[in-house]
Structures are given as C-alpha cells and as structure tokens.
Image (spheres, rainbow, N blue to C red):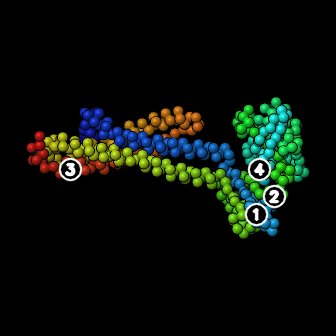
Amino acid sequence: MGIVQCFIMAIKSLAASKMRSFLTMLGIIIGVGSVIVIMALGNGMTVYMNDSFESMGTTNISVNIIGRGSSRTVDVDDMYEFYNENKDLYNYISPTVSAYGQVRGANNEKYTPSITGCSEDYLAIKDYDLKSGRNISYIDIKENKRVCLVGEFYDYVVYGGNALGSTIDINGENYRIIGVVEEQDDKTDENGADNFIYVPYSTAARFIVKTSEINTYTFVAKSDDLVDKGISAIKDRLFQTFHDDDYYAVTSLTIILDIMNEMMDTMVIILAAIAGISLVVGGIGIMNIMLVSVTERTREIGIRKALGAKGKHIRMQFVIEAATTSAVGGILGIAFGFLLSSILSKTFLAALEMQAIPTLESVLLSFGISVAIGILFGYLPANKAAKLNPIEALRHD
C-alpha cells in the first residue's frame, strides 16, 4: 500500500467518525490557534512600538551631563564645536532646558504648559511646522530675548486666533509670542500635546530655571545606521573631559526600542511555549485514539498481514493516519487563529489603535510542530499494530 492510499484511508477514517475526530483534534486546534494569536499580538505590539518611537524620532540622541566640578566641564560652546566637527554624523543639535512655570494669557487664566528652552533647530528635531510667525533665531539666543513659540492650544483657546505678536506671562515675566506651531493633536485639550511653550535656551536657563549651566542636549543623527556611531563619538568626546563615564549619560530611542523589542520577543516566546503545551495535550489525545483504533481494527490488521502485508506497511498506515489527523487539526487551528486575531483587532485592540498581525513564521512553526507531534505520538500505536501476531489478530473478535 502506497503513501497516497494510506492518506486516502486516513481521510475516510476521519470522515467516518466526525465527532470523535473533531474531539481528538481539539487540543491541536486550540494549541495552533493560541500560538498564532499570541505571536500575532506580539508582532502587532512590536509594530505599534516601532511606529510610536519613529514618531518621536529614532535618530534622536539625548545627552545628559552630570559634571565633575568646575575644573572639568563641557559647556554649550564645547558641544557646538564638537557638532561642527562631526556634521557628517549629525543633522541637528539643540541644548535643551526643561522648565516649570505657570503662564497667564489674554483670558487671564492660569495654565501649566510644558516649557522647553531650545535652539533654532528644535522644531526640525521635533518635526514640527510653524502655522504662523517665525522660529527662534541665533540673535534671540545670543541676547537672551524674552520671546517664545507657543502650541496651537494657546492660539486657539487662550488668544482666540490672535496669539502671534501678543505677550504671555511666564512666572511673572512677559514674553512676546513670535510664532505659533501647527496643531499636533487636539488644540482644545489643555492636557494635550499642543500645550507647550518653547523659549531660547539661554533665556530659559537665565530667567526661568536661573542657572548658568546647561547640561542636556539633543543630537539628531543623519540616519538610523549612524546612531550607534554618533553615540560612540559623543561618549568619546565626553570621556576626554571627565575620564569617567559616570559623569554623563548618552542614550537614544533606538537603544530603548531594541531593549523593549528583545523583552517583547522573549515574553512572546515564553507565552507561545506555554500555549504550545496544548499541542502536547493534543498529541496525547491522538495517541490515545490511535491505540483505541488499533484495538478496534485488530482483525483487519490480521487479515492484511495474512495477505502478505509487512509490519512496515502497517506501521506506515497508522503513522500517516496520526499525521493526517494532526495536520487537519493544524489547518483548522490556523483558521481559528486568524479568525480570533481578526476579532481582537476589530474589538479590544481597535481602541488602542493596534492590530494582531499573524505572521507566516508563526503559521509554519505551529503547523510544523502539530504535524511532528502527530507523527511522534502516533508512532507508538503504529508500532504496536505492526508487531501484532497475524494468527492472534485473526482470532480477535
């Protein structure tokens, strides 16, 4: 009997007892579907994180200088000198000063925006466009001018569309609004992304934070491929001054993203392995039903052996039946996994703007394992059938 004939017989055997066959395959179906869904969720989460980080700028490099006393320092001029010497690595640089303050606008209401001291390159770093007015200039920075850029929230809500050229009170000091940045999220939301103010970094340091030191900088590498090289160059420059890497920190979103992706991959593998336990349970179910099948078909096996069938033929028949059972279960499991992934994407995950994305790797992996388990757990019953004594088998009722 050939492989094709064995396969046809296996299909007929499954069709003859549909409910028993379905219950036998249930563990395989659940296992394959679970593995596909878990890996689809992991893939969807990875895509979501990558998109989120890309919107924040994966080429951005953050530098935080802790310092080592007045004898060993790096100031703004030093960092700009380094930047000018390495323009083959970086597109932009901006000293950054994070400040806290309350502001009052035309409506005399108090607001608590995100206030950032920055350079003229900061809009390009954030990939923001101006709606009206002009950007911060070199002269504004050099002369510590009290000017600022505001988010669309202030133009729309606070100034009724007339923010440009108006003054805004920041911690009791008046600043002239020289530019309004395009809307980023929801201009009516006080807690949204449009509630921010940018001032020249020199002004922020001197009048808002009231410090003579600027210790944070943002660099932008020319490409993702140059991020690591850009980080190394900055670290080498800072190490020349401080001779100890404990006095500064250089990080990028790319590094953080890589770490998070590694953690996500590890978690998905662990969860998929746990879900794969049901595949083993399904294999045990297949072995159990094949043992029952061997008992039920003992007389048939005896007749085939009496007619000249060899043990290897009997063994092949039952192994193929087991493999066919697990393969059909695997196919149904793939359909179940895709269906469940689609339902999750359109219901629970839709609110998070995320999708469960099944991958070809997860399909091939889960299906391959299901077939392998079917063959592995089907071999014992097949071997038992192959070793039956034909005379004893013929006497079996």
Residue 43 x/y as whole percent:
53, 44
Q: Label 3 sits on what residue type? A: Lys
Picture quarter with the N terminus: top left
Where is 205 relative to 187, above or below? Answer: below
Determine which of the numbered discs, if any, sits on residue 309 in the image.
Answer: none
**Do the numbered discs 1 and 4 sit on residues whose CB atoms are within 8 Å?**
no
Label 1 crowd (10 A; few <14 / some 14-19 / many >=20)? some
Q: Label 1 sits on what residue type? A: Gly
The label nearer to you, 4 versus 3, is 4
**Do the numbered discs 2 and 1 sit on residues whose CB atoms are within 8 Å?**
yes
The Cα atoms of the two marked residues, 4 and 3, are separated by 75 Å
Determine which of the numbered discs, if any, sits on residue 98 in the image.
Answer: 4
The label nearer to you, 2 versus 3, is 2
User: Residue tagged by mark 2?
Assistant: 213
- The answer, for residue 115, to whether it is visible in the render is yes
Image check: 207 left or right of 54? right
Q: Label 4 sits on what residue type? A: Ser
Q: Please identify the quarter of the rendering in which residue 367 is found.
A: top left
The Cα atoms of the two marked residues, 2 and 4, are separated by 12 Å
Residue 209 x/y as whole percent:
81, 52
Q: Label 2 sits on what residue type? A: Glu
Q: Earlier along the polypeptide chain: callout 2 or callout 3?
A: 2
Determine which of the numbered discs, if any, sits on residue 67 in the image.
Answer: 1
User: Residue tagged by mark 3?
Assistant: 384
Where is 363 relative to 225, above or below? Answer: above
- The answer, for residue 138, to whether it is visible in the render is no
Q: Earlier along the polypeptide chain: callout 2 or callout 4?
A: 4
Secondary structure state at the residue bearing disc 4: strand
The Cα atoms of the two marked residues, 2 and 1, are separated by 10 Å
Q: Earlier along the polypeptide chain: callout 2 or callout 1?
A: 1
**Do the numbered discs 2 and 4 sit on residues whose CB atoms are within 8 Å?**
no
Label 2 crowd (10 A; few <14 / some 14-19 / many >=20)? some
